[in-house]
Image: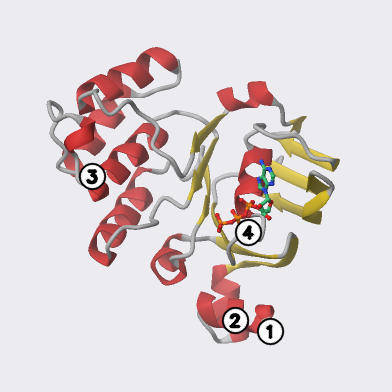
Amino acid sequence: MKPIVVFDEVEKNFYGKPALRKVSFTIPKGQIIGIIGTNGSGKSTILKLMAGLQRPSRGRVLLDGEEAKRLSSRQVAFLPERDVYYPGQTVQQALNFYNAMFGDFDLDKALDMVRIFDLELGQKVAHLSKGNRARLKMVLALARQVPLIVMDEPLSGLDPLVRESIVRSVIASVDPVNQTLVMTTHEVDEVEPLLDRAMVIKEGALIGYEQVERIHSDFGVGLTGWMRGLMK
Ligand SMILES: Nc1ncnc2c1ncn2[C@@H]1O[C@H](COP(=O)(O)OP(=O)(O)OP(=O)(O)O)[C@@H](O)[C@H]1O
């Protein structure tokens, strides 16, 4: 089966400064991938490249076998770090807005997730707690029937209980056959049970890419231990 994402010797420079250095990897369909690494190492840049929101300075980024470009956003649900809705909207209005904007939005799935998350449809987004705003953002991304979902730090700034509940609902909501989920995170321990593979980025270079099961069986450590070993 064709991989959903291919990075082939990808370099990205900003104002002549390298943010990514010859990064190559492939992501098979139907997996959940975590990208971890220190601040400023290039994680978000990788996500934007695979969503077609940025172009590589050198090398190739393929999305389902085709060069990733702006139009690729039709195949990719991108959840940025910043908020993605208007604060004046209610939860229902945010869902309606996404439903009108994206032909692939599954309103029934979104409403199911809203129920599971205990969000109130009539509540103004501006009045939601930080945890509930993060949940709504998650609903808006996961309800799109697209082959690739990309999330930039979906758990950042949330307390451990909220993080856990979000991780559980992500596991329940991703379609394991037709959807691939790639997320960046600093919450390595929490996402570990969710991931099929993990990728470690250091100063713009890919220094580790491994199946989480193999990290446990072959290296006898968890993700944090594996990452620490690579960072040395
Ligand atoms: N649009 C931009 N213009 C200029 N420099 C940029 C731009 N985007 C990213 N960079 C630089 O590229 C490098 C990688 O940034 P990136 O946001 O990909 O890192 P990150 O690993 O996601 O960081 P964090 O964990 O802090 O979110 C950083 O040095 C950053 O300053």
Question: Which residue is under mark 2?
Answer: 228
- Which residue is found at the position 70% from the left and 34% from the top? 54
**Position above or below: 104 against 125:** above
Some atom of ligand 1 lies within 8 Å of the CB belonging to the residue at label 4: yes
Nearest-to-viewer mark from 4 and 2: 4
Nearest-to-viewer mark from 4 and 3: 4
Nearest-to-viewer mark from 1 and 4: 4
Task: Tell whether label 4 touches label 1 (CB within 8 Å).
Answer: no
Which kind of residue does numbered mark 3 sit on? Asn
**Position of residue 133 measured from the top left corner of the image (x, y, whole percent):** 27, 41
Some atom of ligand 1 lies within 8 Å of the CB belonging to the residue at label 1: no
Determine whether, in the image, residue 69 is placed left or right of residue 87.
Answer: right
Task: Tell whether label 2 touches label 1 (CB within 8 Å).
Answer: yes
Q: Residues within 10 Å of mark 2 (few under 14, many from 20)?
A: few
Ranked by sequence position, the earlier of labels 4 and 3 is: 4
Question: Which residue is under mark 1?
Answer: 232
Residue lying farthest front? 15
Ranked by sequence position, the earlier of labels 1 and 3 is: 3
For the image, the number of numbered tags is 4
Distance (Cα) linking label 1 and label 3: 37 Å
**Residue 92 visible:** yes
Question: Which residue is under mark 3?
Answer: 132
Question: Which residue is under mark 4?
Answer: 40
Ranked by sequence position, the earlier of labels 2 and 3 is: 3
Which kind of residue does numbered mark 2 sit on? Arg
Q: Residues within 10 Å of mark 1 (few under 14, many from 20)?
A: few
**Position above or below: 131 against 63:** below
